[in-house]
């Protein structure tokens, strides 16, 4: 039996889409609703003007969780260069993120593995404090 269609989803953002970033998610309409801050397992890479996350492993990535409408998700897919065949700049993933005491199922954009070769990691896991 098919899953019922959701009118909203959650997204975990860790780079330029964070509040105050060059692609601040608040510019989208309908306006995404900030739910809280979260941390996921992964490694953050410096790609110049923006970061890319590789999910999993021992590292931690700092980000924010937003509730978004389907039309915002479509715009984010375009921004992140997601392609249906998996060859785009980012891959669309889903995982559970702890926001306070609540576990939320979130969309996360993971950088395509071919894009991180030779790039330095951001050991802090925080794009806004990349030391």
Image (cartoon, grey):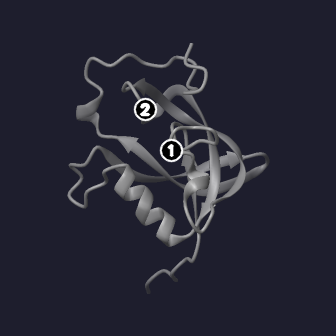
**Could you say which quadrant of the image residue 52 lies in?**
top left
Secondary structure state at the residue bearing disc 2: loop
Residue 117 picture location, percent across and down: 25, 23
Farthest right residue?
101
> Is disc 1 placed on a helix, strand or loop?
loop
Q: Give x and y (percent) for residue 3.
A: 48, 80
Give neighbour class at mark 1: few <14, some 14-19, many 20+ (Cα, 10 Å): some
The residue located at (36%, 26%) in the rendering is 47
Name which quarter of the figure residue 39 lies in. Answer: top right
Residue at image coords 65%, 56%? 104
Quadrant placement of the N terminus: bottom left
Residue assigned mark 1: 23
Question: Disc 2 vs disc 1: Cβ atoms closer than 8 Å?
Answer: yes
Q: In this view, does 104 lie to the left or right of 2?
A: right
Q: In the current view of this chain or complex, which residue is farthest to the top?
A: 131
* Labels 2, 1: front one: 1
In the picture of the structure, the residue carrying the numbered disc 2 is: 50
Identified at 79% across, 48% down, the residue is 101
Residue in view at x 53 percent, y 44 percent: 17
Q: Position of residue 96 (x, y in %)?
A: 58, 51
- The quarter in which the C terminus is drawn is top right
Few, some or many C-alpha atoms within 10 Å of disc 2 (few <14, some 14-19, many ≥20)?
A: some
* CA separation in Å, label 2 and label 1: 10 Å
Left or right of 22 in this view: 117: left
Is 114 on the left or on the right of 16, as rendered? left
């Amino acid at each position: 039996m098919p899953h019922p269609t959701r009118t909203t989803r959650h997204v975990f953002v860790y780079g330029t889409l964070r509040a105050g970033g060059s692609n601040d998610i608040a510019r989208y309409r309908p306006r995404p609703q900030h739910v809280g801050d979260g941390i996921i397992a992964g490694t953050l890479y410096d790609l110049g003007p923006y970061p890319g996350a590789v999910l999993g492993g021992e590292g931690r990535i700092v980000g924010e969780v937003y509730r978004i409408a389907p039309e915002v998700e479509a715009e984010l897919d375009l921004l992140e260069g997601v392609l249906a065949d998996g060859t785009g700049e980012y891959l669309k993933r889903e995982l559970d993120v702890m926001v306070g005491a609540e576990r939320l199922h979130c969309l996360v954009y993971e950088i395509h593995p071919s894009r991180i070769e030779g790039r330095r990691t951001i050991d802090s896991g925080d794009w806004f404090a990349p030391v």
